């Protein structure tokens, strides 16, 4: 008997993260001696700002090495509440904040606390790979609404209105978006909020993890709108804007009854997250934002660099992302072509071709619900970005 038969149906039905899967394939090639340029993972290539690292060292020396409250230390929850009020116009209190081991756990807490078997959750596509799997883990049904490249991959309020059924429990989206970098405007989000407000017991899960990497000049939070204030769960964290991926600090701001439910769940799974990381996060959210602002400027410059290089490749179609650090080009013009050894049928085929032929690691668009595209992260040095696109151009020219 195969051992997988002994595992739960829950785990057998769960897909591996394709971003992590591609990273593993790149690592295998690198171990074989190949010079692989990895543009697959969504991880800043900057170090954590010094004042945040200093706060962590001080916390260790001060003996803050014990269990913390499940929803997080009071100083951090107060700092988050203050930040949301001043920067996002979300009027909340510390008891409505729940800190977790990364925004991914925050999302899981929310979905598992809200979604019942058979509930539908509308997912704006393209979407971050984990949304759909977490919904399935809760025995809910993901319902995909597609935003196309012609509309900067953004779903409209009209599309949302048509997709809502009596089974719809929530909608979920990210802005700035992973994988597209698209940013919803205040007007677009207000129209979406009006649709949600007209329905009973329909919730919004707003993933704002890329909030600080926003090239439009101002981030707008849907949770600030009065008509959906009591329907919105804002999810955020420190990984992207503060270059703290390994510190694993995420949080939600939600109506109190939802926050309490998430705390109840987290109390049975992980309890409070790392004490030292929390004290570091306090320094991040209350301290100097200059390093974050400088990172965002660098990402903007890199975006322009990569788009200019990609636009020199025949067959690649790009839009201009307004945030995050990804480009999500349409590569469907290469489907059906061959280099004489391999025929490209899908974006996954193309990613594997580029990995093996050009030693550039990307992620295929099917992982994000858009099989005509692939995701390229420009959270890398200028040198690596220039070399990676050069290799891609040479390899793609061989496809006829």
Image: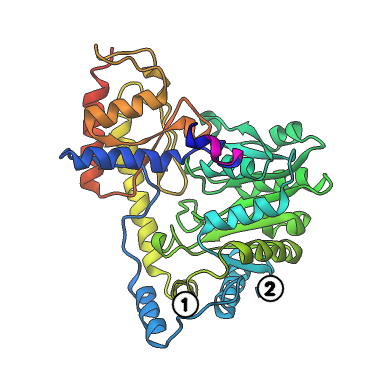
- Residue 93 visible, this orientation: no
Give residue 345's position: percent from left, percent from top: 40, 17
Horizontal relation, residue 31 to residue 8: left or right: left
Range shown magenta: 5-9
Q: Residue at x 58, y 33 (%)?
A: 147
Q: Magenta-highlighted stretch: main secondary structure?
A: helix
Q: Secondary structure at mark 2?
A: helix
Q: Is residue 21 magenta?
A: no
The residue sitting at 58% across, 58% down in the picture is: 106
Image quadrant in which you'd find residue 392: top left
Picture coordinates of residue 50 (x, y %)?
33, 73
Q: Position of residue 88 (x, y in %)?
A: 60, 63
Q: Residues within 10 Å of mark 1 (few under 14, many from 20)?
A: many
C-alpha separation, residue under disc 1 versus residue under disc 2: 18 Å
State the SS at label 1. helix
Looking at marks 1 and 2 on the same chain, the residue that comes earlier in the sequence is marked by 2
Determine whether label 1 and label 2 are within 8 Å by CB: no
Residue at 28%, 12% (x, y): give it. 400
| 158 to 222, vertically: above or below | above
The disc at residue 95 is: 2
- Which numbered tag is attached to residue 279? 1
């Amino acid at each position: 008997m195969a051992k997988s038969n002994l595992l739960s149906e829950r785990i057998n039905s769960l897909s591996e993260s394709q971003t992590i899967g591609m990273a593993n394939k790149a690592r295998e090639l690198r171990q074989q001696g190949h010079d692989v340029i990895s543009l697959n993972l969504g991880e800043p290539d900057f170090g954590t700002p010094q004042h945040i690292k200093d706060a962590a060292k001080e916390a260790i020396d001060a003996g803050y090495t014990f269990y913390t409250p499940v929803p997080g230390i009071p100083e951090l929850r107060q700092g988050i509440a203050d930040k949301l009020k001043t920067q996002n116009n979300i009027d909340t209190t510390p008891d409505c904040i729940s800190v977790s081991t990364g925004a991914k756990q925050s999302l899981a807490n929310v979905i598992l606390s809200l979604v019942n078997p058979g509930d539908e959750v509308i997912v704006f596509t393209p979407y971050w790979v984990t949304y759909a799997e977490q919904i399935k883990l809760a025995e809910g049904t993901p319902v995909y609404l597609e935003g196309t490249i012609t509309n900067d991959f953004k779903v409209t309020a009209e599309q949302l209105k048509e997709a809502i059924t009596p089974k719809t429990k929530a909608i979920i989206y990210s802005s700035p978006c992973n994988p597209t970098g698209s940013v919803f405007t205040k007007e677009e989000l207000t129209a979406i909020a009006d649709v949600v407000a007209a329905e009973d017991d329909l919730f919004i899960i707003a993933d704002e993890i890329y909030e600080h990497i926003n090239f439009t000049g101002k981030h707008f939070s849907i949770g600030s709108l009065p008509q959906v204030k009591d329907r919105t769960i804002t999810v955020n964290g420190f990984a992207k804007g503060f270059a703290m991926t390994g510190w694993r600090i995420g949080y939600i701001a939600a109506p109190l009854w939802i926050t309490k439910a998430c705390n109840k769940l987290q109390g049975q799974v992980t309890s409070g997250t790392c004490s030292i990381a929390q004290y570091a996060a306090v320094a991040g959210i209350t301290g100097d934002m200059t390093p974050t602002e400088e990172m965002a400027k660098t990402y903007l410059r890199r975006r322009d660099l990569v788009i200019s290089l990609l636009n020199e490749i025949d067959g690649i179609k790009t839009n201009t992302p307004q945030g995050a650090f990804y480009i999500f080009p349409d590569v469907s013009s290469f489907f059906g072509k061959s280099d004489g050894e391999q025929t490209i049928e899908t974006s996954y085929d193309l990613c594997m071709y580029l990995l093996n032929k050009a030693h550039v690691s990307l992620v295929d668009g099917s992982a994000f619900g858009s099989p005509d595209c692939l995701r390229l992260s420009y959270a890398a040095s200028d040198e690596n970005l220039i070399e990676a696109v050069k290799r891609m151009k040479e390899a793609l020219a061989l496809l006829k």
